[in-house]
Image: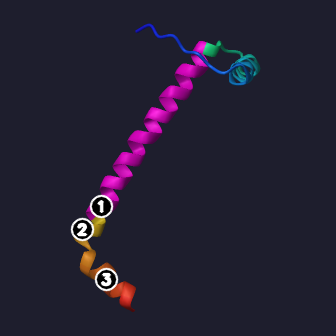
Amino acid sequence: MAMTLRLPEELDSRLEQLAHARGMSKHALVVEATRMIVDLESKTDVAVEIATGVRSRYAELLTRLEDA
């Protein structure tokens, strides 16, 4: 899907430098960065889900440990 991305000049310049240093286009670098943040957020959501389940499952034990 096509998309226009407008970046502040300083960020665009830094993106250009990084893309050049990595030997890739700015487009490829933006796609890689986007994929990384989406994957990170997905993993965070899973971790929060697990932590919530642990908190629910072991609520009594956690309360006793707090009081110890």
Task: Residue type at mark 1: give it.
Answer: Thr
Q: Name the mark on residue 52.
A: 1
Q: Circles 1 and 3: CB distance less than 8 Å? A: no
Q: Are marks 1 and 2 in contact (CB under 8 Å)?
A: yes
Q: Earlier in the sequence, mark 3 or mark 2?
A: 2
**Left or right for 8, reference 58:** right
Question: Residue 56, which numbered label?
Answer: 2
Q: Is residue 34 magenta?
A: yes
Structural distance between the alpha carbons of marks 1 and 3: 15 Å
Three-letter code, disc 3: Thr
The residue lying at 38 percent from left, 53 percent from top is: 47
| C-alpha separation, residue under disc 3 versus residue under disc 2 | 11 Å
Indicate the amino acid at tag 2.
Answer: Ser
Q: Which residue is mark 3?
A: 63
Vertical placement of residue 19 versus 53, above or below: above
Q: Is residue 58 left or right of residue 15?
A: left
**What colour scheme has been applied to the protein in the rendered image?**
rainbow
Q: Position of residue 43 (x, y in %)?
A: 41, 44
Which residues, given as a range, are shown in magenta? Answer: 27-53
